[in-house]
Image (cartoon, rainbow, N blue to C red):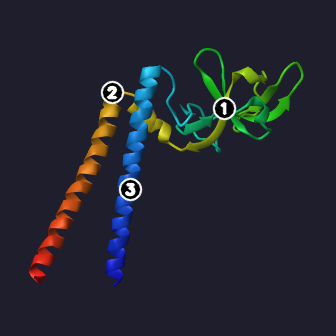
Amino acid sequence: MKRGILKSTASIAAKTVVIALTIAALVLAFSLVQSKVRGGEPSVLGCRMYIVLSGSMSPAIETGSLVVVKPAAPESIRVGDIITFGGGGSSVTTHRVTAVENEGGLSFRTKGDANEVEDPLPVSADRLVGKVVFSIPYAGYVFSYARTRQGAMTIMALASAVIIAELIRTMIRGGRNKSRQDGKA
């Protein structure tokens, strides 16, 4: 009885991993193709994804994390929110809001959790990219690697191998069940 439950649990776990890897590979492929075509950062369902390159938000968001940023109205930002904002050019920063100011226009005071002092200049509302919805530790390293030609090919090969292995396992299991049914007849 326990062996059957263990086998069933292992089967469910394996199927869950296959489904998760397949979804992850599809999202990764979609976002990478999209970012290459548009020439910007990847986005899924209106949320942009960025790779954290520094430890300024540690321990809340570690270096190498992937942050998912949802566009937000500047008026909706509150003290304590983690926001991503544009600097000059293509650089962006992700820091926590320490104060919201309305003198001379809406702006935000920000600070990295690991930093000793606030950022020197307030962030004007027009520089707001959005609010961090969640982060995935170390996923930024995978995305960074996947952006290379070799990385994209490796990710696709791994996803294909997992799907093929699951199909073979299903066919073998189907053959065994057929043999058992033929033996009973």
Residue at (15%, 67%) from the top-left corner?
A: 175
- Amino acid type assigned to the residue bearing label 3 in the image: Val
For residue 85, what is the image quadrant? top right
Of 35 and 62, the residue lying toward us: 35
Number of other residues with Cα within 10 Å of mark 3, as a class: few under 14, some 14 to 19, many 20 or more: few
Q: In this figure, which residue is indicated by the disc labeled 3?
A: 17
Question: What's the residue at 34%, 85% (across, down)?
Answer: 1
The amino acid on which the numbered mark 1 sits, given as a three-letter code, is: Gly
Q: Reading the chain from its start, which is encountered first: label 3 or label 2? A: 3
Image vertical order of residue 15 relative to residue 31, above or below: below
Q: Position of residue 129 (x, y in %)?
A: 65, 27
Q: Position of residue 13 (x, y in %)?
A: 38, 63
The disc placed on residue 149 is 2
Crowding at mark 2 (Cα within 10 Å: few <14, some 14-19, many 20+): few
Give the CA separation, mark 1 to mark 2: 29 Å
The residue carrying mark 1 is 130
Task: Give residue 16's position: percent from left, percent from top.
Answer: 39, 58
Identity of the residue furthest to the front in this view: 185
Q: Nearer the viewer, residue 165 or 52?
A: 165
